[in-house]
Image (tube, rainbow, N blue to C red):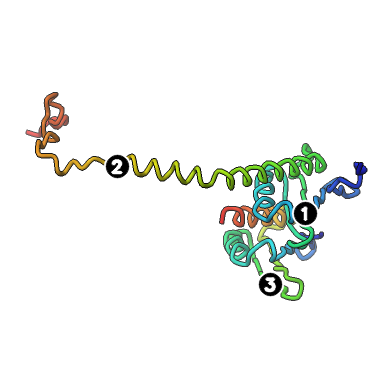
Amino acid sequence: MDSVQTDQDENIVKVKLNLDFYSVEDVLAATKDFFDLGQINMAVDDKNNNVIITISPKDKADRLETIGYEFCNYVLGMTKNR
Amino acid sequence: MTDKATMSNIELNNDKSHALVSVNPQIYDKEIIYSAAYAMIDRAYIVIDGDPEKKVLVEIRPKDSSNDAGQLALEFNEELINYAVYKSQARQNKDLRKAIINLAFTTNSVPDTCSDDNDTYIDDPEGIAKPWTPQEK
């Protein structure tokens, strides 16, 4: 499934979420809440119906994969409680 | 009789770091899948993917090594059934719940105290309406 991909050298984690299950509004809201963590970029891949979130944490010591999966859980929480 | 292996909807990856659960959306709708997944987010990372019409894939990745991915996947299956039954029961009891709430609202009307001619609300038979703080001199 490879929803979370990390690049340790670039200090980047990419999260891919399926728009059939996660709405753009929820992903945007989650992105806003993760602003404190570092730089976040969001792109919609219309062709594959995905949204790709790129997170570049300020702190290099952070576990990138954990951040990516925590983001997934956070969006799921927002989707469930909508 | 169906073989046990072919019945299983759980796929464990080689290093057993995560499990992939296939869910039939004809049986469990999106709301049920969200609820079941949400019930597990304290112990696992969950990602939902796949085709919402044909096959939904739920990736379950334990947060710490004390939890087993396969075990969590089995628990996820149980949660799916749990929420499916809950939803089904809620649907069946919908009219009854509505009737009970309507009854509660119609029978618990607040008495109209403003039209009371006795004005008893200013009576103070116990003498407790006096201020308790010491008066300033």
- The image position of residue B98, as x and y in percent, is 47, 46
Q: Chain of mark 2?
A: B
User: Which numbered disc, 1 or 3, marks the residue closer to the eye?
Assistant: 1
* Mark 3 surroundings: few (<14), some (14-19) or many (≥20) residues within 10 A: few
Q: Which residue is mark 3?
A: A43
Whether residue B122 is visible, yes or no, is yes
Q: Which residue is mark 2?
A: B109
- Label 2 element class: loop
Q: Which residue is mark 1?
A: B24
Q: Which residue type carries mark 2?
A: Ser
Q: Are marks 3 and 2 in contact (CB under 8 Å)?
A: no
- Is A24 positioned to the left or the right of B126 in the image? right
Label of residue B54 in the image: none
Outermost bottom residue: A47
Quadrant of the rendered image containing residue A15: bottom right
Residue B97's place in the image compared with A70, above or below, is above
Q: Nearer the viewer, residue A67 or B86?
A: B86
Residue A29's place in the image compared with B15, above or below, is below
**Residue at horizontal 78 percent and vertical 56 percent from the top:** B57
Q: Which residue type carries mark 1?
A: Asn
